[in-house]
């Protein structure tokens, strides 16, 4: 079992930056692919960034590519999301997620097994 706790959300002006952190419990953290998802009011939850177990492979949708960077430090059980050039449309609750990746899944199609409680990111115009 994995428990995830996000931190680092807040209010920032458009064009600014934020760094989200996710602390994971459990001795098998390095076995999991990790991801960040977000959900804005009235919208479905969407994938923002994912990273494989080793950190050597990442995936971003076009909406954040070039602006967001996901990273992990397995020795510390930590995952990060560096968000630059933030836009008002990035406003959402951001969730950290963990997935063991079944044989049919990739980091682009992951369906997480575990979720954090979320952290609010608000970008003002």
Image: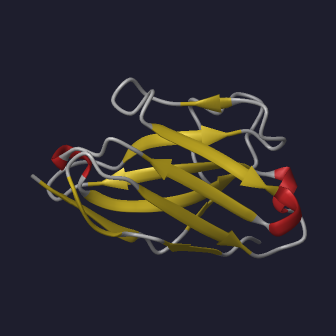
Q: Is residue 49 above or below residue 65?
A: below
**Nearer the observer, 25 or 68:** 68
The structure residue drawn at horizontal position 61% and vertical position 67%, both measured from the top left corner, is 22
Q: Is residue 28 above or below residue 36?
A: below
Placement of the N terminus among the 4 image quadrants: bottom right
Furthest residue in direction left, as rendered: 125
Compared across the picture, whether 113 is left or right of 43 comes to right
Compared across the picture, whether 38 is left or right of 117 comes to left
Q: Quadrant of residue 11?
A: bottom left
The structure residue drawn at horizontal position 72% and vertical position 64%, both measured from the top left corner, is 78
The location of residue 32, given as percent across then percent down, is 77, 51
Compared across the picture, whether 16 is left or right of 9 comes to left
The structure residue drawn at horizontal position 66% and vertical position 58%, both measured from the top left corner, is 79
Compared across the picture, whether 52 is left or right of 28 comes to left
- Colour mapping used in the image: secondary structure
Q: Is residue 123 above or below residue 90?
A: below
Q: Quadrant of residue 57?
A: top right
Q: Quadrant of residue 42?
A: bottom left
The location of residue 107, given as percent across then percent down, is 64, 33
Furthest residue in direction top, as rendered: 62
**Nearer the observer, 22 or 25:** 22
How many callouts does the rendering have?
Answer: 0
The location of residue 117, given as percent across then percent down, is 47, 75
**Nearer the observer, 66 or 49:** 66
The location of residue 46, given as percent across then percent down, is 37, 43
**Nearer the observer, 122 or 92:** 122
The structure residue drawn at horizontal position 86% and vertical position 55%, both measured from the top left corner, is 30
């Amino acid at each position: 079992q994995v428990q995830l706790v996000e931190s680092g959300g807040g209010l920032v002006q458009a064009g600014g930056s934020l760094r989200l952190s996710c602390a994971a419990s459990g001795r098998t953290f390095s076995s999991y692919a990790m991801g960040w998802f977000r959900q804005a009011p009235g919208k479905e939850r969407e994938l923002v960034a994912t990273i494989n177990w080793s950190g050597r492979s990442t995936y971003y949708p076009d909406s954040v590519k070039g602006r967001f960077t996901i990273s992990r430090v397995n020795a510390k059980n930590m995952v990060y999301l560096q968000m630059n050039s933030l836009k008002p449309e990035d406003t959402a609750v951001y969730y950290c997620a963990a997935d063991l990746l079944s044989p049919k899944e990739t980091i682009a199609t992951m369906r997480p097994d575990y979720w954090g409680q979320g952290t609010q990111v608000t970008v003002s115009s």
